[in-house]
Image (tube, rainbow, N blue to C red):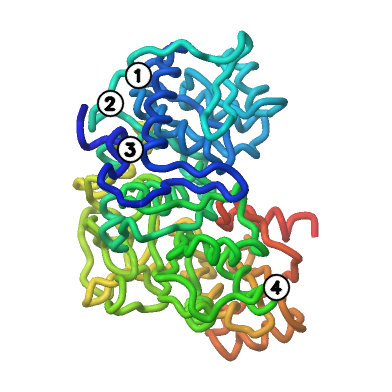
């Protein structure tokens, strides 16, 4: 068995008693967890699961997911986790696109079960009994076991889809070697050890929660605290009860914790560090987090095609620069000219962020056109615009396809978001392009308030902070902002949500 695979993820020398802690549920030692993975991999092989083909995993954040994800990989198959909140049509699209051989769902009625049945894909139920995973199908509990074929480093381990922020989701196959390199990069960068305990607040079907927080912690020999879903009211109780040393989340979750901090009696000194990833963290929120929770905030930059992390703020005593996503972490990062001719830019010059590394996928699934566009001279084009400073710190200026072109002036949405968030009455903000007959595109924004303000007072504030052509023509006051299941804002959906039909 290759040592560079998920089958060898767990740290056998870990001195930690507990690998996984389910609040209000079972706790697994590393030894028990390893036994469960091997046992369940044998059951999957006995049920006819074939190496090299995807298995759709439709489970929430729980022990079943953590066992089955690694058991599928140990059996030589490809784990394809899906958001359990999808519609039937969404499930069908992702299952068909992955060519799934099996779907794993919780017992009872579920849209994932319905979708798989409509597609003729076999279904297995997964549940927990006394800390052990129970698999069953229409014929009863699975008991037949077979020798599971061990994977190799070059085998596909994980099949995900892009989040589709600017286009239709594309299939991303990631090898065991891709994942293990990314896990190693993350573990090394954050200096994770068996003394660390991470609270998992992001969904495990996405690389942020799976790679950025969970598998990296397990590889270090640390402990995971996995509530079924994020609850702000329970968060600090978990941190205290389990002496958690870090957590990773999107800015939305950080902002929720900040807004509730005093009411929830959050500590003034909390974690060894706080990690932020998956969307831009406004400098003002960065500062508020550090000031209120007494922990260094490390902003990271990741994407599915890179098995998650590409850069991060350095650990103390390294310099943390709000508004940047830090330094490259085991990955080559460069800036290419906007025409993508292969010409690399000088420090300070804005262009498209490109990457190289062992964690980067080899190509999208059955999509030669996308692959031809995505790779230039061995560099993967991220689709993000930004620049590197003289010290190698990376700053993002926005998604290239999301830049607002107002009469030829290219406007960064991230810049305007950051200024809106500095307004004392604004809790959340997003700006976006709206088609306009005169200017081509104009700037609109939507905000969620935490104090008294209206459109005109916020626009007046913006006029003091930025050039007039950048100031949003319209500001919508909203109760909430549309987001993906992982907390990302999809700017391309904002026109539909706030403009059309108004």
Q: CA distance from mark 4 to mark 2?
A: 53 Å
Residue 342 rendering spot, x and y as whole percentages? 21, 54
Q: Are marks 3 and 1 in contact (CB under 8 Å)?
A: no
Badge number at residue 146: none
Kind of element beneath mark 4? strand
Find the distance from the CA under tag 2 to the CA under tag 3.
Answer: 26 Å
Residue under pointer 1: 51
Query: At numbered mark 2, what does the secondary structure look like: helix, strand or loop?
Result: loop
Is residue 215 shown left or right of residue 431?
left
In terms of sequence position, does the residue under pointer 3 or pointer 4 come before the other? 3
Residue 310's x, y, as percent?
31, 57
Mark 3: secondary structure: helix
Q: Residues within 10 Å of mark 3 (few under 14, many from 20)?
A: some
Q: Pointer 2: what residue? A: 151
Q: Position of residue 90 (x, y in %)?
A: 61, 33
Which of the image's four quarters has the N terminus?
top left
| Mark toward the start of the polypeptide (3 vs 1) | 1
Q: Residue furthest bottom?
A: 464
The mark that comes first in sequence, 2 or 3, is 2
Q: Residue at x 55, y 42 (%)?
A: 26
**Which residue bears the numbered disc 4?**
475
Q: SS of the residue at dot 1?
A: loop
Contact between labelled residues 4 and 3, with CB atoms less than 8 Å apart: no
Nearest-to-viewer mark from 3 and 1: 1
> How far apart, in angstroms, are the residues tagged by discs 1 and 4?
52 Å
User: How many residues crowd mark 1 within 10 Å: few (<14), some (14–19), many (20+)?
Assistant: many
Mark with earlier residue (1, 4): 1
Are the residues at dot 1 and dot 4 in contact (C-beta closer than 8 Å)?
Answer: no
List the residue tagged with mark 3: 371
* Residue 119 x/y as whole percent: 59, 16
**Does label 4 or label 2 sit earlier along the sequence?**
2
């Amino acid at each position: 068995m290759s040592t560079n695979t998920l089958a060898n993820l767990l740290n056998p020398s870990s001195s930690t008693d507990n690998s996984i802690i389910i609040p209000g549920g079972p706790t697994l030692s590393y030894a028990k967890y390893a036994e469960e993975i091997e046992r369940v991999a044998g059951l999957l092989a006995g049920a006819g699961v074939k190496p090299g083909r995807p298995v759709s995993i439709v489970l929430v954040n729980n022990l079943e997911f953590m066992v089955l994800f690694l058991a599928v990989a140990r059996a030589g198959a490809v784990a394809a986790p899906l958001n359990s909140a999808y519609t039937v049509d969404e499930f069908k699209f992702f299952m068909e696109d992955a060519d799934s051989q099996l779907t794993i769902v919780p017992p009872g009625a579920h849209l994932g079960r319905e979708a798989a049945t409509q597609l003729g894909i076999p279904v297995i139920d997964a549940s927990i009994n006394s800390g052990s995973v129970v698999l069953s199908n229409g014929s009863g509990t699975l008991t037949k076991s077979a020798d599971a074929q061990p994977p190799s480093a070059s085998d596909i381990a994980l099949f995900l889809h892009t989040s589709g922020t600017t286009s239709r989701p594309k299939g991303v196959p990631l090898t065991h070697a891709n994942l293990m390199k990314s896990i190693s990069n993350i573990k090394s960068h954050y200096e994770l050890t068996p003394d660390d305990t991470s609270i998992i607040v992001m969904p495990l079907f996405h690389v942020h929660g799976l790679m950025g927080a969970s598998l990296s912690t397990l590889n270090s020999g640390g402990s995971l605290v996995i509530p079924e879903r994020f609850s702000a009211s329970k968060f600090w109780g978990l941190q205290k009860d389990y002496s958690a040393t870090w957590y990773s989340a999107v800015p939305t979750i950080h902002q929720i914790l900040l807004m509730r901090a005093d009411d929830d009696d959050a500590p003034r000194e909390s974690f060894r560090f706080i990690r932020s990833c998956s969307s831009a963290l406004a400098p003002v929120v960065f500062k508020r987090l550090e000031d209120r929770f007494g922990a260094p905030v490390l902003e990271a930059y990741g994407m599915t095609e890179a098995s998650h992390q590409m850069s991060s703020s350095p650990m103390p005593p390294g310099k943390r620069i709000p508004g940047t996503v830090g330094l490259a972490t085991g990955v080559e990062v460069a800036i290419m000219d906007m025409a993508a001719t292969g010409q690399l830019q000088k420090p300070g010059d804005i262009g498209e962020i490109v990457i190289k590394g062992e964690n980067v996928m080899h190509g999208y699934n059955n999509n030669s056109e996308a692959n031809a566009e995505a790779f230039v001279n061995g560099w993967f084009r991220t689709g993000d615009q930004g620049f590197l400073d003289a010290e190698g710190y990376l700053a993002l200026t926005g998604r290239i396809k999301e830049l607002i072109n107002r009469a030829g002036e290219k406007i960064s949405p991230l810049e305007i978001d950051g200024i809106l968030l500095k307004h004392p009455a604004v809790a959340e903000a997003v700006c976006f392009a709206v088609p306009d007959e005169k200017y081509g595109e104009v700037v609109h924004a939507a905000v969620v308030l935490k104090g008294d303000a209206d459109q005109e007072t916020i626009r007046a504030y913006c006029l003091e902070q930025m050039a007039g052509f950048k100031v949003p023509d319209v500001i919508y006051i909203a109760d909430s902002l549309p987001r993906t299941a992982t907390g990302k804002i999809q700017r391309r959906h904002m026109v539909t949500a706030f403009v059309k039909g108004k």
